[in-house]
Image (tube, rainbow, N blue to C red):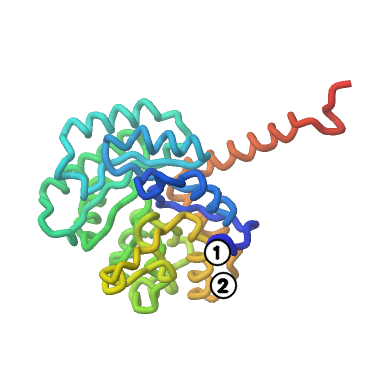
Amino acid sequence: MACTDTPDLRWIDTHCHLDAPEFGPDRDAVRARAAAAGVRHCIIPAVRAADFDGARELAHRFGDAYALGIHPLCTPEAREDDLVRLDEALARYQGDPRLVAVGEIGLDHFVPGLDRERQLFFYREQLRLARRHGLPVILHVRRSADDLLRELRRQPVGGIAHAFNGSTQQAHAFLDLGFALGFGGTLTFDRALQVRRLARELPLPALVLETDAPDIPPHWLYQTAQARAEGQPQGRNEPGELAAIGRMLAGLREMDVGELAEATTRNAGRVLPKLVDLAKATKVAKVTASEAAPGPDNLRP
């Protein structure tokens, strides 16, 4: 669906794991398709210390942005000195305009067998580092909104609650703390009643768009468990699907697609302020390149 989208709209995919191994065979083509679909920036959140350099390199390679953090699902293998590595990386790249957040961090109370206290330790420490380095956070929220909010009230910091699927009360609690809420492929499913209701009824400044690619495929890529058991592969989500997801959100809210693209881009810049500076720098670079290109006014005699 991405290839049929109108390219003059400009979207920001606020959560896209371009560094995932699923994109290994054709990563450049994936990003090119996203650009053709109007995705101006992808934010690439690292999920473990070993991925910090890779996320940063891809962001610079594609002109995107990145975040550094330790995902709650990675805490069983994470070591406490990974927090030292994170602290050092945040200090080292403080002046990098493409480093926009600490993330993906948070809590996961859905996957069985995870040590909640260990997750909470890494979450608290990473909030502390975000505050130390003056960065917002990108939060993993899965059946854990209340616990996340409790810690945020103790260590206030803004950012994005990624793939939000909580209650209306929890949504407004995040908004009151300066967060935006990430919506993606889940809202394309008719049965996702709560997510669709929130996406439709929350104030427009609350919303940012994301794909979580290669995860959380929209309904047109999704294969049921039965279909997968019969040998049909799960469709791979890509950042280029963002525009189609955006169209569906615009339909839910009964608003113009262009207005939605502009609003969600503006919202992303509000909660991740370095995106605004990055966009300005990109625009200046394009103008400079245009002025330097051969033309009737600057050709040498």
Residue 84: horizontal and vertical position, in percent? 23, 29
Foreground residue, 238 or 230?
230
Q: Residue at x 34, y 31 (%)?
A: 90
How crowded is the residue under tag 2: few (<14 C-alpha within 10 Å), some, or many (20+)? few
- Total marks drawn? 2
- Label 2 residue SS: loop
The residue wearing badge 1 is 260
Foreground residue, 298 or 161?
298
The residue wearing badge 2 is 255
Circles 2, 1 touching at the beta carbon (< 8 Å): yes
Q: Residue at x 59, y 64 (%)?
A: 4
Residue 25: horizontal and vertical position, in percent? 42, 45
Residue 124: horizontal and vertical position, in percent? 20, 44
Q: Residue at x 47, y 48 (%)?
A: 42
Q: Which mark is residue 105?
A: none
- Label 1 residue SS: helix
Which kind of residue does numbered mark 1 sit on?
Answer: Leu
Q: Residue furthest top?
A: 301
Quadrant of the image for the C terminus?
top right
